[in-house]
Amino acid sequence: MAQKPARSSRRIAVVGAGIAGLACARTLQRAGHAVQVFEAGAHAGGRLATLDTPFGSFDTGAQYFTVRDARFATALQATAADLARRWSASAVRVLDQHGRVAEAPPPRQEAHWVAAPSMDALPRRWAEPLQATGALLLSTQVLRLAPDALDARRWQLHTQGTGDEHLVHAGFDTVLLALPAPEAQRLLASAAADLAASLAAVAIAPCWNLSLAFPNAGEPGTLGPQWNAARSTHHRVAWLTRESSRPGRAAIERWTVQASNAWSAEHAGDDAARVTSKLLRAFAEITGIRATPAWTEARLWPQARTLQPLGQPFVWDAARGLGLCGDWCLGHRVEDAFVSGLELALAALR
Ligand SMILES: Cc1cc2nc3c(=O)[nH]c(=O)nc-3n(C[C@H](O)[C@H](O)[C@H](O)COP(=O)(O)OP(=O)(O)OC[C@H]3O[C@@H](n4cnc5c(N)ncnc54)[C@H](O)[C@@H]3O)c2cc1C
């Protein structure tokens, strides 16, 4: 899409290329500003993440998204209608620790959407215009935010890239942090301690995620239970999905297990092998599947789910040219991240 020249083009740094950062950066770039996005990971997407294995992909972060906000619906329709697929996890039920139904699914559930062929297809799509214009720096972690050495009204970012390369990127009129709250607080601690302190009430829980593949299971969907997704009241496990049931995925029997927030916090320091063995035992208790998986991988998301949001869609300090966005401003969903990033961009454009 052609970019409109901004009335007065600003140099804007967006730190973090999760959904919030991408929504924010794309809006500002389309308005004609010179945007540079810094992303620590090798891909855009953050917690919309996919693990590729010899047995097929696993969505190790967000499993689905809801579409409640009209602007999110419009963005998906305009840019990713071919990727967004409705997932009939409509019978998501709540199971107890023995896999018995503790709570039946409500008669009408909100639509669950996934990106096909994997969840990371959506952020990859949204990153394309930024990548095409050289505005996205991947594998570049921002270590420090400081006033610009040559012009104290501006900002500079100290980064570490691949191969331990340290650089300083200077001359930003505006810096927008699209990071989990604790990481934003860390960067703000020396540059704007008051903004860092304003996030003190935000609480975020970790989550251990376990990926399991059973390539010898035979016909897809025949191993274990007849359901494809469930919440669980088991003290170790909060959510289970049959990955192979999701639209556009390979048919090999694969399961994703997400540990509960409390158990993940208690075991955040454990190694992956110990966590795998404990979660596998819980998985067997809930699903009745006792086969040995051919593939397991456990991953800890240290900042997975917002327990206490900020309660406002973004933070914007026009005088200092500093802003904050992320799912934690509003809640714990992909959609919250999108709305937060979009609204911060619109505030910065005013
Ligand atoms: C296991 C799990 C399951 C989930 N399930 C669902 C679900 O089913 N439905 C749903 O709607 N939501 C779900 N979520 C939440 C959803 O993934 C998030 O709400 C959303 O992806 C957050 O986007 P964000 O842009 O705010 O943050 P993030 O996705 O965390 O993006 C932040 C980005 O900043 C980068 N970064 C961090 N520090 C730096 C630095 N110093 N310099 C540069 N870059 C940095 C990170 O690499 C990351 O890419 C789940 C999350 C997890 C972890």
Image (tube, rainbow, N blue to C red):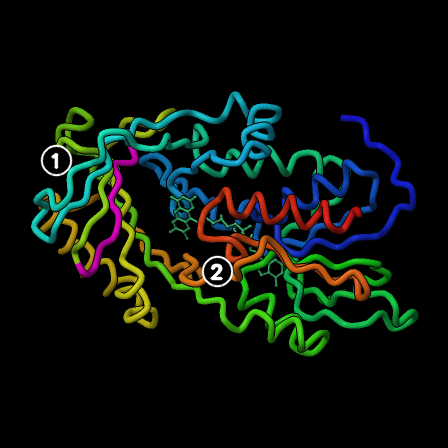
Question: Which residue is labeled 2 in the image?
Answer: 309
Classify mark 2 as within 8 Å of ligand 1 or not, answering yes or no.
no
Q: Is residue 117 left or right of residue 214?
A: right
| Residue 62 visible, this angle | yes
Where residue 119 sits: x, y (%)? 45, 37
Residues drawn in magenta: 235-245
Q: Residues within 10 Å of mark 2 (few under 14, many from 20)?
A: many
Q: Residues within 10 Å of mark 1 (few under 14, many from 20)?
A: some
| Up/down of 36 relative to 226, above or below | below
Q: Nearer the viewer, residue 340 or 118?
A: 340
Classify mark 1 as within 8 Å of ligand 1 or not, answering yes or no.
no
- Which-is-in-front pick, marks 1 and 2? 2
Amino acid under label 1? Pro
Question: Which residue is labeled 1 in the image?
Answer: 225
- Membership of 242 in magenta stretch: yes
Amino acid under label 2? Pro
Q: Secondary structure at mark 2?
A: loop
Where residue 113 sits: x, y (%)? 41, 31
- Choose top left, top right, bottom left or bottom right for residue 150: bottom right
Residue drawn at (56%, 69%), measured in percent from left and top? 199
Q: Is residue 145 left or right of residue 46?
A: right
Q: Earlier in the sequence, mark 1 or mark 2?
A: 1
| Residue 291 visible, this angle | no
- Membership of 43 in magenta stretch: no
Give the Cα distance between marks 1 and 2. 35 Å
